[in-house]
Image (cartoon, grey):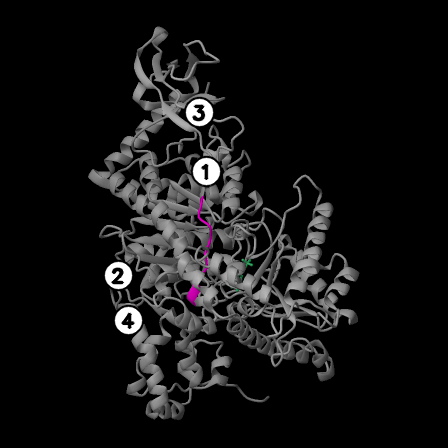
Amino acid sequence: MAGTLFQLEINPKLPPRLARLEELANNLWYSWDRPTRTLFARLGSKLWGAVGHSPKAFLKRVDQRRLEEAAEDPVFLGALAHVLSAYDTYHDNLRREQGHQLPDGALIAYFCAEFGFHESLPIYSGGLGILAGDHCKTASDMNLPFVGVGLLYRQGYFLQSIDGEGRQHALYNDADFDDLPVTPVAGPGGGDLKVAVRLPGRDVWAKVWKVRVGHVSLYLLDTDLEENSPHDRDITHQLYGGDRTTRIEQEIVLGMGGVRALAALGLKPTVWHINEGHAAFLVLERMRDLIRTGLDFDAALEAVASNTVFTTHTPVPAGHDHFADEMIRRYFEECCHDMGCEVGSLLALGRIDDTPEFNMTGLAIRGSRFQNGVSRIHGDVSAEICRKLWPQIEVDENPMDYVTNGVHVPTFLSDHWHDTFDRVLSPAWRQRLTDAQTWAQVHAIPDHTFWSIRQSIKAEMLYLVRHRITEQYTRNQCSQAHIDRLLQLADAENPNVLTIGFARRFATYKRATLLFRDLELLRRLICNPERPVLFIFAGKAHPADQPGQALIRRVHEVAQMPEFEGHILLVEGYDLRLARRLVSGVDVWLNNPVYPLEASGTSGMKAAMNGVINLSVLDGWWGEGFHQDENGANGWAIKPASRTLDEERRDQEEGRSLYETLQDKVIPLYYARGPMGYSPGWVAMAKRSIATITPRFNSQRMVGEYLHKFYAPADQQWRRKSADDYAAARTLAAWKQKVRLAWPKVRLRRLDTPVKRIPYGASLHFELAVHLDGLAPQDVAVELLLSRPGTDSRTRPPRKLLLEYRGPGEHGDSIFALDFTPDVCGKLDYRLRVYPHHELLTHPFEMGMMLWL
Ligand SMILES: *Cc1c(COP(=O)(O)O)cnc(C)c1O
């Protein structure tokens, strides 16, 4: 083509009657309010698809005449009025979750490296981001005082295509921020608000953008500014892109720049939530601020930790973000100078083992007093991984807690169910998402109605899958005849084939190809013309993850085998849109990770609330979800093989369990069609799936738990520790210092003679001499633990009784004693211990010190 190509875009002007479309396009409320999205689609469904469902991009390109027509169209105006009325009701509703009101002035700041709200804001890669998005949406639903902080990447996660050989191609697109639902924040002097962070030898500027998520604001930082060098402009270029240098610089911008951005906005959080270690540098920035006002290092750490919450999502030590010490030295030299500390003190905050690495989880835990994993199993795994941070505390007592993840119901519930629940459940069901009785009402939906709703949702899913597969295979030069054969079972007109979905990141531990261990058996199971089965796979592998990409090739390869043609589909470009359709549209949701590596997993929750039945390894959330139903009738469970087996044997056993479940349970139940054309047993199980799983595994329950367990206590701790110029933080820091010095010499000695047998009603006397090495008797707690032999201390915690200080003993020891009359008969076990105690501690064992007799 000769000549220069100039580009031009002509933006329409909104007619006054449609003026508020602009507001709707700039609030991610549309990401969970389907009528709002439908409104845009009605103005031009082709353009709506072409702009990737971004209302903002849509309003820039829609035809002026179309807008003017719509402004005169009573049907469109009616729909608009309807949407606006719902929008206004939502935003006028200032009722906080009843009974759990945080005090005035409370503000929760939530930091995360990725956020997944909707496909129109591509700054997420997978489950972590979607969870963070759901957390913000729910904070808005619950009217919490809440802000989010993240990064605005020029290139979010890549677009995926899969070629005719099953190879993944990653396409990175530069986003035009004008097309995203983000707005620059105005600075004090008029222009854009920018904050600087210090990197070695230079300041890097970051512009602050605001995203509206219902009531809640999310602030995103972006370094692509003229003030910055080309290198620094690229810091926020790509989500999880670049090398270690990029990563540390991104994390400094997120953690430290984020703190500065909130300060520049005049916001004063009283609770800080670090969602996964990437954001943990916020601890250092906050400490530096406090040290500047006159606190010392330890008191500043005490103050900062008192209102910091840390959530870990990683189930293997190697997955925790870490940097070489040398890198930390270089990046934090000036910070240490500002903080008046040796770099060694800072490095010590990130030390977990004796390896010369700075671990972000170490920093996050030392800088927080509230820590959790994201399911019961993962809480235990995390307590184990992090045990060295509390060296003398037994794993089941250390502070690592758990809050099981949940998903945002309005976002992931199909609109067919929205409409049905409006008719069938109690009218306030949207406000009662965590109420089991409300959800039990799904049993009242007539079976045939339930089935036909499922069929409609499935047909819509198949329609999208057909469309995507056709595009994908046409591009890969397949003939129409071939495509028709591939799509023979994916028939939206006749959605009667058992359809099983597997879609998530192609990470190796998720074992996408476990199903293919025995192809001959698989063929017999799924290619029976009487009872055919269709599998739909989708997901991205990180471009640097070669084994993950090999999994994609293997799925492609099996899908191409003549005997499996049409039975296995691999759909490219997994994103939130495809996710919403798949999780709601298939019949069964399959997940077979390696135990215990699925920290939580959330896609199965999205499936369950839509009446899709889970078939999953009992790992992550399913370890709890399956047991929500005491009859085990809300899905199917694959029991993890013993962890002592090698990888091959484990895969073999779990693979066999998967085949057996498909053969004996899933396929027969689905095809046990009654006279009405559906399987009553299937419908019963699907209903139980909704009824037992939805009330617990939704994000309202999750954020509610964060609120009670962490946010409210953290807010209170902050008030306490920061009052009177941080007097309590200083006191606690000084006390801990004293205890740390004395503790190695503390000793316990028993003075009473243990008795082995007493009659009922007799009293026991326990007496201990504690050598305190200069500590005062009130600096410690001396405790007796009583339990029944052989009981699990987690399910039945031991009874705990404190011994009293009775005065000084010999050699400067302190005497502690207890007289106690057991009120039970039979055998008892008991143990005695001492640990540091101060009323300002947040967790009784946060110092990690304890001595047993
Ligand atoms: C829910 C979701 C995930 C998480 O899936 P898991 O099976 O929990 O790993 C990933 N990607 C998208 C787009 C999702 O919606």
**Residue on which the image places disc 4:** 89
**Residue on which the image places disc 2:** 95
Asked if the stretch drawn in magenta spans residue 404, the answer is yes
Q: Is residue 498 left or right of residue 563?
A: left
Q: Position of residue 528 (x, y in %)?
A: 75, 69
Name the residue rendered at 50%, 45% in the picture: 376
> Which of the marked residues, 3 or 4, is nearer the chain's N terminus?
4
Furthest residue to the left?
724
Spatial separation of the CA atoms under disc 3 and disc 1 = 40 Å
Closer mark to the observer between disc 3 and disc 2: 3
Name the residue rendered at 65%, 72% in the picture: 497
**Residue 52 in view here:** yes
Spatial separation of the CA atoms under disc 1 and disc 4 = 50 Å
Q: Give the quarter of the figure containing the N terminus.
A: bottom right
Please, what secondary structure does the residue beneath circle 2 have? loop
Identity, as a three-letter code, of the amino acid under mark 3: Leu
Closer mark to the observer between disc 3 and disc 1: 3
Spatial separation of the CA atoms under disc 3 and disc 4 = 55 Å
Dominant secondary structure, magenta: loop
Number of the label disc, if any, that sits on residue 347 = 1
> Mark 2–mark 4 contact, CB under 8 Å?
no
